[in-house]
Amino acid sequence: MMDKHLSSQFDAELSGISTRVLEMGGLVEAQVAQAVQALTLFSTDIATQVIRIEERVNQMEMEIDRDLSSIIARRQPTARDLRLLIAISKTIGNLERVGDEAARIARTVQGLVSTGVSSRLRFPVSDVSHEASLATNLLRKSLDAFARLDTNQALEVIRQDNEIDREFDGLMRKLITYMMEDPRTISAAIDLVFVAKAIERVGDHAKNLAEQIIYIVKGTDVRHNPPDAVADMVK
């Protein structure tokens, strides 16, 4: 009876932490969307909100990490549960870095607005927004896959990361063209390069989350493998 009671407590603790990870994921997903909205509207007010959210994201990472350490010390979990806890630790690290990328975009927006270039020059902001839409959708799919421990959806995320990479490459070519045609755009275009790279990294972190899901379920480390090889590993 005592063992059953302890097991129920442990399951409740794992469930509670998983719920908080999803809450943190929803927060950073919204943060990225707001950062892109700030860029689209050249809004310093929205950019400031994004930067403020970063503090909460950082706090959540520290709180969950502390609780993970406590559970490992108290419960001494066995194989699958330990994999889950390790994967959660890596997952919240990736989510925190997504928040960092969103804050980086917001600070870039503040810089663009302060220099006045947003009102004087045209930029391929719609292309950046499309790249961001792909990245946030990928992040959402990863979080959904985490909630259901769905390895098939995790594999789909890993495959779709290539779409964001292609979008990033196309945006780079367009920005280079802008700079060649009008030297006045060089400084601001370079800022947009960093924005596009930040969004591309959001996609990378979503892929990392998907890899952790497969690790939890299958116990297989699929990092640094092409999608086809990962597909074979999860069969």
Image (tube, grey):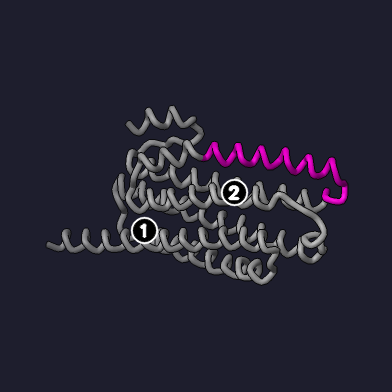
**Left or right for 221, reference 135:** left
User: Which secondary structure lies at badge 2?
Assistant: helix
Q: Is residue 90 magenta?
A: no
Residue 64, percent from left and from top = 44, 62
The residue at 30%/46% (across/down) is 80
Q: Amino acid at mark 1?
A: Ser
Residue position marked by numbered label 1 in the rendering: 18
User: Which secondary structure lies at badge 1?
Assistant: helix
| 64 or 187: nearer the viewer | 187
**Left or right for 31, reference 87:** right
Q: Are marks 1 and 2 in contact (CB under 8 Å)?
A: no
Residue position marked by numbered label 2 in the rendering: 130
Q: Residues within 10 Å of mark 1 (few under 14, many from 20)?
A: some
Q: Amino acid at mark 2?
A: His
The residue at 74%/51% (across/down) is 123
Number of on-image labels: 2
Segment colored magenta: 161-186
| 228 or 71: nearer the viewer | 228
Q: Which quadrant is the C terminus positioned in?
A: top left
Residue 96, percent from left and from top = 54, 57
